[in-house]
Amino acid sequence: MTTRQIDELIWRAFTDSGFRERLLNGQRREALGAFGLSAAEQQVVMTVKADTLESFAGALCHPGFCGS
């Protein structure tokens, strides 16, 4: 997953409350569908455990998680 993809995902969650709700409350797989992630990338994002956008973003931006 590239840094750009992570930026786009977080920006969408920040600006779209419905998307953010789906991302954090059980509909993450459906929410991720619009981002063209590979199955492996989706699986990695699905493993993030977070109940706030801040903790979700922090998990995605953790060193070693982001690609180039």
Image: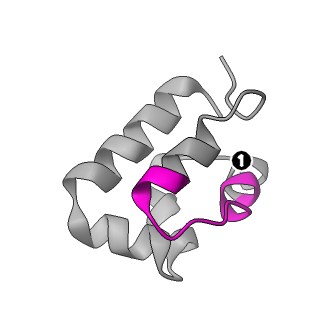
Q: How many marks?
A: 1
* Residue 43 found in image quarter: bottom right
x and y, in percent, of residue 49 in the image: 66, 66
* Residue 8 found in image quarter: top left
- Secondary element at tag 1: helix
Q: Is residue 35 left or right of residue 20?
A: right
Q: Is residue 22 left or right of residue 3?
A: left
x and y, in percent, of residue 47 in the image: 74, 63
Q: Is residue 65 left or right of residue 13?
A: right
Q: Is residue 51 above or below residue 25?
A: above
x and y, in percent, of residue 46 in the image: 68, 64
User: Is residue 48 highlighted in magenta?
Assistant: yes
Q: Magenta segment, which residues?
A: 43-55
Q: Is residue 21 above or below residue 11?
A: below
For this orientation, the residue located farthest to the bottom is 26
Q: How is the image coloured?
A: one colour
Determine which residue is flagged by label 1. 41
Q: Which residue type carries mark 1? A: Glu
Residue beneath the point at 79% across and 50% down: 40
Residue beneath the point at 57% across and 65% down: 50
User: Is residue 38 highlighted in magenta?
Assistant: no
x and y, in percent, of residue 45 in the image: 66, 55
For this orientation, the residue located farthest to the top is 68
Quadrant into which the C terminus falls: top right
